Image: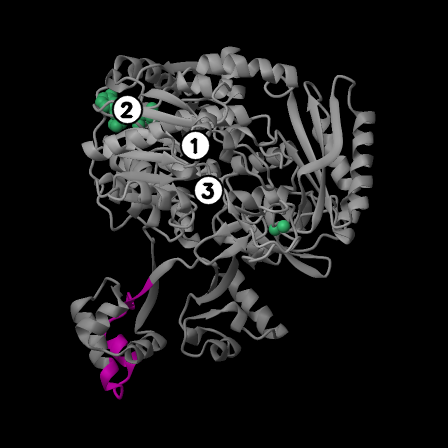
Amino acid sequence: MFAQIVVDVPAGQTDRLFDYKVPESLQGAVSPGMRVVVPFGPRKLQGFIIRLTENTTVKKVRNIDELLDVTPVLTPELLDLGSWLSEETICYQITAYQSMIPAAMRAKAKKVLYLQEEIVHFPVFIQTLFGKRSSIEWNKVPMDKDLLSLIRKEVRDGRILLEYEVKDQARKQSYKTIQVTPKKSREELEGMAGNRAKKQLEALRWLLEHYPETPVPLKQVEAEGGFTRAVLQALVEKGCVVEKTIEQYRDPFKDKEFQKTVPLSLTNDQAEVLHPVREAVGTQTHETFLLRGVTGSGKTEVYLQAIQKVIEEGKEAIVLVPEISLTPQMVNRFKSRFGSQVAVLHSALSIGEKYDEWRKIQRKEVKVAVGARSAVFAPFEKLGLIIIDEEHEGSYKQEDHPRYHAKDVAIWRGRYHKCPVLLGSATPSLESFARAQKGVYRLLELNNRVNNFPMPEVELVDMREELKNGNRSVFSNILLEKLEDRLQKGEQVVLFLNRRGYSTFVMCRSCGFVTECPHCEISLTYHHVNKQLKCHYCGHEESMVNKCPSCDSEHIRFFGTGTQKVEEELTRLLPTARVIRMDVDTTSRKGAHEKLLTKFGSGQADILLGTQMIAKGLDFPNITLAGVLAADTLLNLPDFRAPERTFQLLTQVSGRAGRDKLKGEVVIQTYNPEHYSIVHAKEHDFLSFSRQEMTQRKVGGYPPYFFLALITVSHEDLSQVITTSEKIASHLRERLSIQTKVLGPTVSPIARLKDRYRYQCMIKYRNEPDLTKTLREIADHFQSEMAKDKLFISIDMNPHMFM
Ligand code: ADP
Ligand code: ZN
Ligand code: ZN
């Protein structure tokens, strides 16, 4: 028998299947989706078995060395998906497969030999090897040819059992138990212990009396019986008791009580959108639904009741939520409905915790996986539904190999399992919305908030006017008045500050010099806490200067406003306000995020001030005012999606206010009050926004009218970057159809990063069936130069980042 294997060398030449022979000792134990160790040239490499075959055309086929798994880590479906993914996103197959398994599984396997019969029945060599033990680790066995062939024979005859114990970086949490060796009489056991070992006999008798048949934790025996570990260990070695390690899941939610919730009785609108989804689940029909529901329209309850149908059908569901809205509040809503049937895959979990959650899915112990992007690879085998909440979110696109979009993967899996995919958002991406309007997806709509609470009133404040009237504060007079009003009424406020472009940079007032990172073309950010300047791209850090390095002036100081500065100003203007600040600095400790939110939710603060992370998923009834301090910061990014992102963000922030009986209000401060994305956000008018934005996209030749591919070339040597990117561009112009536009090469918006110069080419196309093939050829062509010359070429299909 032979195995076709993808080996762990991410390179063009090795990106194919290699044939290996399955040695006799492993026959019956191997199956596709398992990881193996194979010889590769002079090296030993890990790989995945993709398929097993009867024949091979390879002349000198080598043996598989080791098997790393006892059960497959990739299902047949995921093996197919990986090969599709590698084609679509132009990445190596090994990269695609590695991305589907938990990080913790970059594993080494421990091989253990277990005697299946009494030691006396074995040849003397083997008796000497095992001594008094009944098992021995493979790597403790001397590599003696005669001994090895003896062992091999015994393994073949089934008198020695060879087992693979996966030893992972993230060790499973486990505890040791002991149990009286089964199927032995009391006399036999006492004989094995020997008369002279008084303590050991005592322990053995105690065990026989208290736990004759079941395993007990070693700790418990020590505590209850008062025996030392050495005594018990001796019994293990003599074979009177057997030791067993019991695996225990680390449960990140174990300290928490989930109050069970029951399905709410749906509003008519909710029932109407739920119906076709449940029907598709019931009839096992693949269809993609786009649920456009305003904030607070009760989309989550629709998800929950759709999942309930999935569980009733004996199937499984995946729910994707953006990383930043994967808050405890969000998780609670699923856990409290479906309890222990839910696994949560969250990047804030430790590697080990994530691994445990993944194993629950693999072992079919849960029915629902809730998680961020990569949860789309959850190894379920009976999928009944995949939900993507906030489907417009950019974080569903992975910005590293494989550069996949979770939506594409979800739809692929939906087709495979003949199950529906449900995309939900208050502000769908224009790509999805266009597809829904063309009937590629089925559009479902929730146009009103639950109980018909009105959408909040939005007021735009022109910050240029404020400046003209002499107000240099980050707070307009109107916002300040409203803040005072809420404080007086005891109602709560969220204030939103976009971190990007709004952090503090250092500039000389005399000559305009800005301190930049010496490795990246990016200004350094001032961190108040340790008075350091930091590069947010490469981590470079330096101390704050007192004098301008360029002109020696002492008028060098930081500009811009970070959350910390706003907090200071807020407490100065409103000394009685209790403020909670949420940003990367205050939430970096594990659990801090949740603590701060709980504190705010229980009314221990008046104002929640934060970055992106507070824009989503907050559902507190007492919030009656939401403020956006500078709506423009996103608008000015060099990205065709900037207006769309601005509209989405403002809509999300508005959605935080007035979610209960109290009326909500929103204040948006901006220097561009006429911009259509801001005007339509004020009116909660998605349809008008999308109509206008579609016109812009058509004129600019952007998605959804055109597809994009972005090629970025980088190297330490500028001239090499330019020549390479020019070669690529002209090659593309030759190969692609004349309707396709190849733009560039031009310098990237971030011209230098980590000491590497960066140039890019953009391809705009409508129909280019061979594009991925052509791009792969380009990547392969430069492969050797990339390896020896540190040239990087990155290819991003449907890019979401243009920096
Ligand atoms: P969305 O996800 O669309 O923003 P949510 O699902 O968070 O909206 O719902 C908003 C609020 O309405 C939540 O507090 C939720 O518990 C409540 N809600 C949803 N559906 C119903 C219903 N059918 N009856 C009563 N309350 C509901
Ligand atoms: Zn200066
Ligand atoms: Zn840097």
Question: Which colour style is shown?
Answer: one colour
Range covered by the magenta-colored residues: 175-200
The answer to whether one can see residue 3 in this image is no
Residue 24 against residue 650 in the figure, above or below: below
Amino acid under disc 1: Gly
Residue 664 — which label?
A: 2
Q: Position of residue 595 (x, y in %)?
A: 29, 47
User: Earlier along the polypeptide chain: callout 1 or callout 2?
Assistant: 1
Cα separation, mark 3 vs mark 1, equals: 18 Å
Residue type at the position of mark 2:
Gly
> Residue at (54%, 70%) from the top-left corner?
139
Q: Nearer the viewer, residue 608 or 314?
A: 608
Does the beta carbon at disc 1 come under 8 Å from ligand 2? no
* Residue 178 falls inside the magenta stretch: yes
| Residue under the point 35% across and 19% down | 278
**Dot 2 crowding, Cα within 10 Å, few <14, some 14–19, many 20+:** many
* Label located before the other in sequence (3 or 1): 1
Mark 1 surroundings within 10 Å by alpha-carbon count, few (fewer than 14), some (14 through 19), many (20 or more): few
Front-lying residue, 528 or 140: 528
Where disc 2 sits, the SS reads loop
Residue furthest to the bottom in view is 196
- The tag on residue 683 is none
The relative height of residue 372 versus residue 216 in the rendered view (above or below) is above
- Residue assigned mark 3: 561
Q: Which residue is mark 1?
A: 470
Give the quadrant of residue 82: top right
Q: Give the percent coordinates (x, y) of residue 346.
A: 41, 44
Q: Is residue 518 above or below residue 286?
A: below
> With respect to residue 438, does 660 lie above or below?
below
